[in-house]
Amino acid sequence: MIGIIGAGAFGGALAIALGAEGPVLLWGRDFDGKRIARLPGAALPATVTAASDLAEMAGTETVLLALPAQAMRGFLAQHAPLLHRKHLVACCKGVDLATGLGPTGIIAQYCPDATAAILTGPSFAADIAKGLPTALTLACTDEAAGQALQKQLSTPVLRLYRTSDVAGAEFGGALKNVIAIAAGVVIGAGLGESARAALMTRGFAEMKRLALHLGAEAETLAGLSGFGDLVLTCTSAQSRNFRYGMALGEGTSFDDNVTVEGVATAKAVYQLAKTHDIEMPITAMVAALSQNRISLADAIHALMTRPLKQE
């Protein structure tokens, strides 16, 4: 049996996809065992069982942590004893604000005897829940565990590609959220499709600059968890980060109840970039805009008047 902690949109979608192949134990604070609140209309297979208590996860060897990136550390600090010696697969994208660590780094900190992995890539929960074809990256430094997880978590419509480059998978997934906000700003401000294409291209260069400096591999960043996810989230209004950016660009309000991982990631990555002396002007702009430290007009002016240079 596979355990999933977190019954939000992505955790629920994974429960539906994996439940089509075998038993799944799903836990969520607001999960009533009948429906996924953030996936209206989605039907849960009979193979998905609601866990009334987290202690029930003791009977599972593999647990997917479908929690927001900024909630991971607090959750594991409180519940780590229940998750020792398991395969723990993070299903979130971000950099922890307090520590600068990615999800597997947080897992290693609180559950050092567990095998940490991350599942990431271009995917919308609604598509997975509908059974639409989706390809993801599964990153794990333990080769044997990675192979076992790849086999266990793949389905006829959910195709997993394996890598041992955890840093590349984590940074690709986290950083693309920041660039997606910036892409939304471009469209919301009415700057046009050409400007979005330029933003995505320069944003990808920015992603690579930091990620490669911190140990990621260029091949991973050019794959599903980097470039693939960047394309999806910068071009679709299904992306919460993109929609948030559009609201910034339009000067309109955004639903405070919707988690936008790129906001906290922009702050965390901005600090990382300063620490490592890496130039990341788009990230700096997103961090400043989301904290109301700069106006939209000034942000656009700052980016457009940067020194001319060779690509």
Image (cartoon, rainbow, N blue to C red):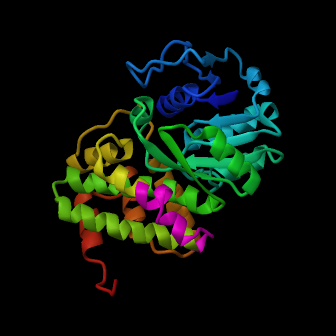
Task: State yes or no: residue 200 in magenta.
Answer: no
Q: Position of residue 37 (x, y in %)?
A: 45, 20
x 37%, y 41%: residue: 240
The residue segment tinted magenta is: 213-228
Q: Tell me if 309 is positioned left or right of 172 in this view.
A: left
Q: Quadrant of residue 1?
A: top right
x 65%, y 39%: residue: 152
x 55%, y 44%: residue: 92
Return the residue found at the far bottom. Answer: 310
x 48%, y 61%: residue: 223
Can residue 130 be seen at all in this image of the molecule?
Answer: yes
Rendered view: 26 above or below 91: above
254 or 15: nearer the viewer: 15
Rendered view: 263 above or below 63: below
Q: Position of residue 142 (x, y in %)?
A: 75, 55
Question: How many discs appear?
Answer: 0
Q: Main secondary structure of the magenta part?
A: helix
Q: Position of residue 234 (x, y in %)?
A: 33, 53
Rendered view: 4 above or below 164: above
* Image quarter in which the C terminus is found: bottom left
Can residue 298 be seen at all in this image of the molecule?
Answer: no
Q: Tell me if 297 is positioned left or right of 29 in this view.
A: left
Task: State yes or no: residue 216 in magenta.
Answer: yes
